[in-house]
Amino acid sequence: MTYLFVLIFFEIFLKQGVLSVQLVLYHITKANNPNLSMQNYKSYNTKDFILDDAFCRWVLQKSETDNQFWNQWLLENSEKSHQVMIAKEIILKIQNAQNEITESELNDEIQRFSEKRKQLDNKEFTSKPNIKVLSWLPWLKYAAVLAIAIIGFALITNQDTVKKLTFSETAYDKRTKAIEKALVEVSNDGNHEKMVKLPDGSQVLLSKNSKISYPNPFGVTQRSVYLSGEAFFEVVKNPSKPFVVYANELATRVLGTSFTISSYDKADEVKVIVKTGKVAVFPLGLEDEVLDKKPEMMLTPNQKVVFNRIDNQMKRSLVEIPEPLKNSADFSKSLVFENSPVTKVFEKLFEVYNIPIVYDNALMENCRITAELGNQPLFEKLDLICRAIDAKYEVIDGQIVIHAKKCN
Amino acid sequence: MKMNENIPRDEALVSELWLRFKGGDGEALDQIFALRYRELFNYATRFTKDKEFIRDCVQDLFLEMWSHREGLVDSPYVTVYLIKALRNNLFRKLKLEKRLGESTDLNDELYFLSDGQSIESEWIDAELLQENEQTIRDAISQLPKRQQEVIFLKYYKGLSNEEIASIMNIEKQTVANFLHRSLTSLKRNLVMLAEFLILPFINLLFLKI
């Protein structure tokens, strides 16, 4: 206990002493040497030493040349020894703090490497020809499957679609190959949708001719899933671990929600359609980097994003038949209006479908309607409303925009 | 100052081992592995906490070097060469996992850029000496990834700003800025941690005596 106390006392004493010496020296040397050269350590304070290349190298690498230089320098500038000592200690502390491996772990890995290297040698010398043949096998299998797929496809479709198929690797194959960890792959070759349960409890309804891969368990930072084809996702909420689906040119990131991705390799478009919750969609570059120029697109329910693979454009719009979020029984009652302001009707519609409706409040404050907006699709409802108040609507960027005239 | 005059003591040994390894001496490579594994592993922990993944990554890198030894450069600055190679491999393999998680880091850096001027006068000093290793480790781990990387290259291995710039593919001046910013935020993190951990401990000591 006493020993500890002395140590801390010593450090506090040192700190104060150094700070005052430092200040005085700084002024003197600055005044005497207006043009400081790189070598002029006399004017250095602790910070300068810590940031100095040659100083760090001396502390951490201890080369003969550096040792000679600094020992000599300290002899000549003994008044700097406090700063030097503190800077040195700080650097060594930071170095130690960054060590995350123990001696035994290190030895295990050295052992493991040595063995693997020798194995590699044995393979190289004894069975070289075999390995070459073996390494061709997966490729041949792949090529055979692809060839059969192409022939099959050519038989059942016309020439136009066939020319889209190329021999190049699909984005899905490229991605799953680049992952070091073993991935679980589920493919659906049947005629019905297939339910897949993911390690985090999320559920995937895989459409036919589609497949997904995912690590089991998921990674530490995010839940990554790779998709080829089409699937509906129902994601379990976990705000600290985003759920990310990679599908051709798009990455879709969610925290917990449900949505569909349609990304067949041969199709002209990649689509993401949101059912509930909020979804962020990112366009990906050739190397799977997120493209800065094209920022993420946020999607809310009943919105979809379509990535056109021909002109590389990403467009947000609405699904063909927007669906109410709540049960139809609940909302059909709430959509009966008698001489209600139309703005209130829009508010109700927003509640039911969660689609943003844009309108000029001031212009439409006097517009009133009486209507029973029961079970017809949203767009038919909008047609009815617009006819009643002599307005028009259009869908722009996933929102409904109402163009109206003033009502009296 | 030329690099070859100031090569660290064991770097000369590593260079010698490199030549032997290139000539087909497997045990020389085992020795390079033993001498440099620790820092490569620690370097990789700046990018991912998945130790299993890092172990495999380093093993793969060295096995790859062994199979392609004929095609490798003759006399590189081996440590820097290894760090660069590992960095490339890590980035390639982490790319899919990492990318999207990175946006928060970038935001952090923007934040530090904007207030860089006002904290110029603050500085770390002997305060750091009073911190224990775990506290410093925690404070470092709270830095944005790129700042962690700079701190590592500078204060683990003692590389120069120029060498760091070449590894990270950025300008030398950017390295200096990063370092300055990292140390300042490191201190800030330490002060925050210290209020919770260190100060009560020190008070306790004084009271007892």
Image: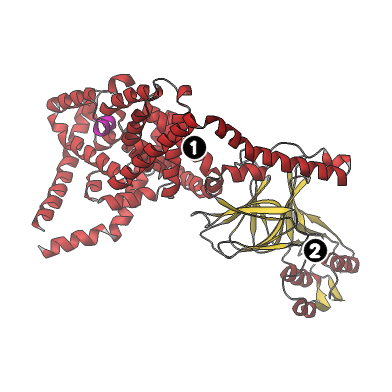
Horizontal side, residue A174 vs residue A345: left or right = left
Which disc is residue B89 wearing? 1
The reply to whether callout 2 and callout 1 are in contact (CB within 8 Å) is no
Front label number (2 vs 1): 1
* Residue A214, placed above or below residue A379: above
Q: Is residue A57 magenta?
A: yes
Residue at the spot 61% in from the left edge and 42% down from the top edge = A288
Span of residues in magenta: A55-62
Location of residue A38 (image quadrant): top left
x and y percent of residue B47 in the render?
A: 44, 44
SS category of the residue bearing label 2: loop
CA distance for labels 2 and 1? 61 Å
Residue at the spot 39% in from the left edge and 33% down from the top edge = B176
Horizontal side, residue A20 vs residue A233: left or right = left
Amino acid carrying mark 1 in the image: Asn
Chain assignment, label 1: B
Quadrant in which the C terminus of chain A is drawn: bottom right
Q: On the image, numbered disc 2 is attached to which residue?
A: A363
Q: Nearer the viewer, residue B96 or A19?
A: B96
x and y percent of residue A391 in the render?
A: 87, 62
Residue at the spot 66% in from the left edge and 51% down from the top edge = A227
Give a yes or no on whether discs 2 and 1 share a subunit.
no
Q: Is residue B91 magenta?
A: no
Q: Residues within 10 Å of mark 1 (few under 14, many from 20)?
A: some
Location of residue A64 (image quadrant): top left
* Residue A91, placed above or below residue A216: above
